Image: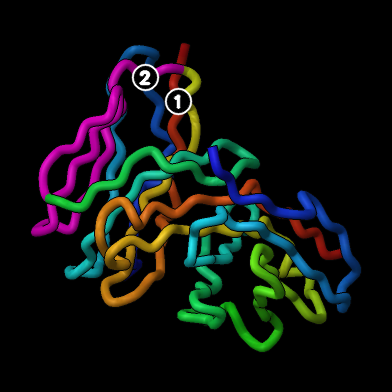
């Protein structure tokens, strides 16, 4: 079964450092997402990406964050100047676009296993 | 008002019983609703999607949607200890591609 692949599974970094989290979405999927889940809290939307540009972003997704699709397969989240409160699990997700974004079947969001970021 | 609300639980049910999980949402125009299961330390995995009012059954799971009441529920029949997890309700906000998740309900199935 196709899956979303994320690397690294766990990254430990010092406060102020930059981190890049990588994702390989399912090959025929066209919408890509990053979500964050702080330990014990809800899964929070960060950003969605389609057709090589950001389609939506949350208030959390400020200038500290950026996303990129550097080639035909990878989708990355860059966090600059990390802070202690950036410690969380970061999930990449993707979905296939059918005949319309709000039609059934095309809307299933598939998540990767996550990248746990620990900022010391 | 929160966009998607769930009781955080824990909801404890004996093995073999029916577990009933509830979710309300604030966007009256939302059309797409999902239930995900998340085991501790793992990523969310889809259980069911529902788009029309009424019931949708898949094995031991039944999702129920009432758009007039802005209410989605998930019933798990013959609950098993392996069903013990956090169940997340998700809604696509109308006019967007944003999937918004509730805080999740933690379910414990007691053997």
Q: Main secondary structure of the magenta part?
A: strand
Q: What mark, if any, has residue A24 been given in the picture?
A: none
- Residue B54 is one of the magenta-drawn residues: yes
Q: Which residue is label 1 attached to?
A: B83
Asked whether A117 falls inside the magenta stretch, the response is no
- Residue shown at 14%/51% (left/top)? B52
Q: Is residue B7 above or below residue A58?
A: above
- Residue sitting at the far right: A14
Packing grade of label 2 (10 A; few <14, some 14-19, many >=20) is many
A15 over B80 or under it: above or below:
below
* Chain containing the residue with disc 1: B
Q: Nearer the viewer, residue A49 or A43?
A: A49
Q: How many angstroms separate mark 1 from mark 2 (CA)?
A: 6 Å
**Residue A87, image quadrant:** bottom right
Name the spot of residue A68 as percent of width and height, x first: 67, 77
* Horizontal side of residue A60 vs B55, given as left or right: right
What x and y, as percent, mark residue A20? Answer: 78, 69
On what subunit does the disc labeled 2 rest?
B
Front-most of B96 and B40?
B96
The residue identified by callout 2 is: B79
Q: Which residue of the protein is positioned furthest toward the bottom in this rendering?
A: A63
Image position of A90 (left or right of B108): right
Q: Which residues are magenta?
A: B53-80
Q: Residue at x 54, y 66 (%)?
A: A33
- Please state, as top left, top right, bottom left or bottom right, where the N terminus of chain A lies in the image: top right
Q: Is residue A109 visible?
A: yes
Q: Does residue A72 sit above or below B71 in this rendering? A: below
Q: Is residue A58 visible?
A: no
Which quadrant of the figure contains the C terminus of chain A? bottom right
The answer to whether residue A90 is left or right of residue B97 is: right
């Amino acid at each position: 079964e196709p899956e979303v692949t994320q690397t690294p599974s766990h990254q430990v970094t010092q406060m102020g450092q930059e981190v890049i989290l990588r994702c390989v979405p399912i090959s025929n999927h066209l919408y890509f997402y990053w979500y964050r889940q702080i330990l014990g809290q809800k899964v929070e939307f960060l950003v969605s990406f389609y057709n090589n540009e950001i389609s939506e972003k949350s208030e959390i997704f400020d200038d500290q964050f950026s996303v990129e699709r550097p080639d035909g397969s990878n989708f990355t989240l860059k966090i600059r100047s990390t802070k202690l409160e950036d410690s969380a699990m970061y999930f990449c997700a993707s979905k296939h676009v059918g005949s319309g974004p709000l039609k059934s079947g095309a809307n299933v969001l598939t998540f990767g296993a996550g990248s746990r970021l620990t900022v010391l | 008002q929160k966009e998607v609300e769930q009781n955080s639980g824990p909801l404890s049910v004996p093995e073999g019983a029916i577990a009933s999980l509830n979710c309300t949402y604030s966007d009256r125009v939302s059309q797409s609703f999902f239930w995900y299961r998340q085991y501790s330390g793992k990523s969310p995995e889809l259980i069911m999607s529902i788009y029309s009012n009424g019931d949708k059954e898949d094995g031991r799971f039944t999702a129920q949607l009432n758009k007039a009441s802005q209410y989605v529920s998930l019933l798990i029949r013959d609950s098993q200890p392996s069903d013990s997890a956090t169940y997340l309700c998700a809604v696509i906000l109308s006019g967007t591609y944003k999937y918004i998740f509730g805080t999740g309900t933690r379910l414990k199935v007691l053997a």
